[in-house]
Amino acid sequence: MSLLQKDIQNIWHPFTQTYGSEAPVAIVKGEGLYLIDEEGNRIVDAVSSWWTSIHGHCHPYIAQKIAEQASTLDHVIFAGFTHPKAVDLSQHLLRLLPANFSKIFFSDDGSTAVEVAIKMAVQYWHNQGQTKNRIIAFKEAYHGDTFGAMAIGERGAFTKAFESLFFEVDFIDAPLPGSEDRCLQQLQAAMRPDTAAFIFEPLLLGTAGMQMYSAEVLQKMVDLCKASGVLTIADEVLTGFYRTGKCFATNNLKSGSDIICLSKGITGGTMALGVTACAQHIYDAFVSEDKFKTFFHGHSYTGNPIACAAACANLELLATAESLQKISELCRLQAQWAHHFAAHPALHIARNLGTITALEIKTGDNTSYFNTLRDTIYQHFMRKNILLRPLGNIIYVLPPYCITADELKHIYSEIELFLNQLHTKA
């Protein structure tokens, strides 16, 4: 029985309707920008494997540090114990994060990092004898697939089966260009005496189609929350670790959030790890002689030493002049390519933020994750050995920082050929 036959027999893949789907691609090796299948085809990973692989696959330095840690300490319960790599990672992160952050809570992935943030925010008020349990969030947001994360995200096809189980959320429009004033008014109106927190994807709504908005309006929203005593939670699972050009998207703000959620690029795409960092005043609300004020949350693999070692190695790489230069160059090239495509007749708009460029294709249907053009785009580029995972009719390019100018040009040259063909047929 072949590898694919065994897969089809045994495995249920994420975000995949098995009926009518093509068989998964069997990948046996990763090498920098490339994924290599069992037939030896080198596939360009233009989306960093769900936005995680920031240095490219199988970076030798991260692999070395994982191997060293695996032979030293594989795991230890993190309740009542600690270990060197968790301490090292906390120090690394707190040096990078805005100065108001002081404590690091470890979990498993982006969705659980968000769950931790929601629970922190609600219990923060509970521990002070205040009932504040409503959350404000953006429409079209995506924060993960666990229940709390789903509840504060876009209500639609992904969540319809579970909506009767969600807690109430006050949704407002994201402040996309042209709608800033309306969104500020909506935020002001949504804040109530029982509002605990406002959660947002800073500057970029990823799954909503790589929609982008300004730091200026986000600062105004954060300021409104601070003035009203509402906590702010920045979901930087996608935007963290230089995806928007700066280490964190909230580095663009003069005053940032009370809580921040991190994952994806934190280990360079090698290990599962989530982090929720908070300001000192959040932590202080849980320190008490009253044991019922304890933060009762944890995971079996919280603070796993191997994952922490991978994250430390990743952050060491990010701090090098070579990596920072690569990131700066990728930002410059991505902006150039967005400008190049800005007037293409097949496109509604080309957007760019830092290392991310998104191209929204004109279609007879509305822009949507379920736009029928999605499968056509995906299959076309897979035949070209380029992995693009479009969000409906939106092609985005979000590559690892190791990509060269020529490799990026190859991706965009193929995209341009596709768009030209699409426009000719229209």
Image (tube, rainbow, N blue to C red):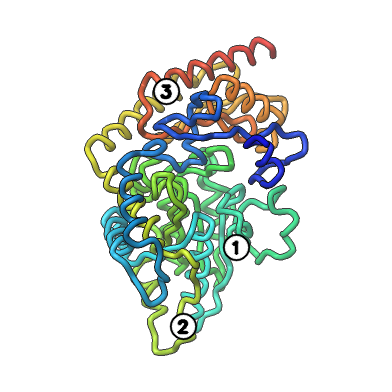
Callout 1 secondary element: helix
Q: Tell which circle, 2 or 3, labels the residue nearer the N-terminal end.
A: 2
Numbered label attached to residue 408: 3
Between 340 and 372, which is closer to the camera in this rendering?
A: 372
In the rendered image, residue 199, in percent from the top left (x then y), is placed at: 51, 58
Callout 2 secondary element: helix
Residue at 51% from the left image edge and 24% from the top image edge: 40
Q: Tell which circle, 2 or 1, labels the residue nearer the N-terminal end.
A: 1
Residue 134 seen from this side: yes
Please give the residue where the numbered disc 1 appears in the rendered image.
148
Which class describes the residues within 10 Å of circle 2: few (<14), some (14-19), or many (20+)? some
Q: Do the residues labelled 2 and 3 touch (CB within 8 Å)?
A: no
In the rendered image, residue 51, in percent from the top left (x then y), is placed at: 48, 41
Which class describes the residues within 10 Å of circle 3: few (<14), some (14-19), or many (20+)? some
In the picture shown, does residue 331 fall above or below 106? above
Q: Is 18 placed left or right of 318 in the picture? A: right
- Quadrant of residue 194 within the rendered picture: bottom right
Q: Which image quadrant: the C terminus?
A: top right
Numbered label attached to residue 293: 2
User: Residue farthest to the top?
Assistant: 424
